[in-house]
Amino acid sequence: MINLIKENKKFFIISAAVLYFLSAGVSYALFRATGKTEKDVVSPVGNSSLKSGVLKIDPQMPRDQECPLNGAYFTKPEREIWEKRRPLLAMIENHQESRPQSGLSRADIVYEVVAEGGITRFMGVFYCAAAAGSEEPYDIGPVRSTRTYFLDWASEYGDYPLYNHVGGAGACDDPTVHPKAKALCQIGEYGWKDKGSWGDMDQFALPVSACRREPERTGESRATEHTMYCDTFNLWKIAAERGLTNKTEKTGLSWDNEFRSWLFKEDAPLAKRGEVNKISFSFWSGHPSYDVSWQYDKEENIYRRFNGGQPHKDFRSGAQLTAKNVVIQFVSEQGPVDEHKHMLYGTIGQGKAIVFQDGQAIAATWTKKSRQERTVFFDKTGREIRFNRGVIWIEALPAGNKVEY
């Protein structure tokens, strides 16, 4: 009798274990397939549905809410989401193996400059266009490491911006990195890791719900460094848990307390649009895979982007990336400055620029008085340039580079 009880007990334990692992396997498979958890997130806006970070918008709803970053118009429910947050800035790489990237089509503003070796890197600014969320989890990437000059631009978006990256150049005690290139050290010095102002979104300090490796995301196996993707919804959620919503826990102030918005305007009428149809340039000679061209569509009044001679498409949507404004910002270039081939670019000060909008090329200048001051662009009469409402793409080229148009 005792042996029978023992055998039954043993059978029960084994059966329970099998059922557990089967259910866990199914759950894991579902997670891998969908990337979603079982619980839905309740929308903070009216009767709208925000499920797993996605806001369902009535297409008939008026788009009359101005985005403070690029002047584009969105719906009221979208504004009610973004105004409870602060901008999220993410480092997205442009190495050939990183293409096609995910998420750049939902950035309000994009910066591009060389990271090292003639290979450019992007910093997407996500706020208004990303407020409604993405149908797919882990919606931006591949996310890559930071560089010091990107921090200068990031500092323009509030007291403690949300800055997403995977490590970066130079801890404070690293003797192999040039003192001015130590981006990780600077992040700490700026207070972006402090309690109550912890805006640094370094992947190494984030849970898998925020960022994860996807080596075969594009259908091809990629090297590990080109496989990190992050989830904007969960990044904003983590920021809120750290005390960073639209307000900063440490100061009690809103992120836009001293934010300096650019000026905006409506599109020029069709009859007044120019004939500058193509813009093309290289960041470094001899690196054609990173050459850029923009093709102007006069009817739609947009610029379509080409990356290394190919249409630059977003992986998730499959659509070619476009902009309403393309800004060439000429900056001083120094480097490589250390054994890691780090570069330094002059983002603070002043210089020349060309602003392309409405099919026209506007000779311009730029000025940025300090790290936290806004970069502002002026035409040849000294008047601040008004950007068309929509995506603004900043191309930071070494001073002296030729731009053909």
Image: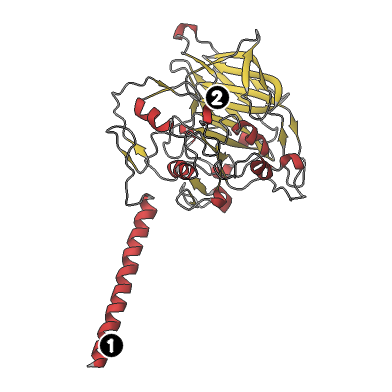
Nearer-the-camera pick, 222 or 191: 191
Nearer the observer: mark 1 or 2; the answer is 1
Find the distance from the CA under tag 1 to the CA under tag 2: 75 Å
Q: Amino acid at mark 1?
A: Lys
Label 1: how many residues lie within 10 Å, few (<14), some (14-19) or many (20+)?
A: few
Q: Vertical placement of 241 versus 128: above or below?
A: below
Q: Is residue 101 left or right of residue 174?
A: left
Residue 183 percent location from the top left of the image: 67, 42
Q: Nearer the viewer, residue 46 or 60?
A: 46
In the image, residue 151 lies at what x, y percent? 63, 36
Q: Is residue 140 visible?
A: yes
Classify mark 2: helix, strand or loop. strand
Name the residue beneath numbered marker 1.
6
| Residue 70 relative to residue 132: left or right | right
Quarter holding the C terminus is: top right
Residue 104 numbered mark, or none: none
Which quarter of the rendered picture does the N terminus lie within? Answer: bottom left
Residue positioned 39% across, 50% down in the render? 35
Q: Residues within 10 Å of mark 2 (few under 14, many from 20)?
A: many
Residue at the spot of label 2:
294
Tell me: residue 264, above or below residue 396: above
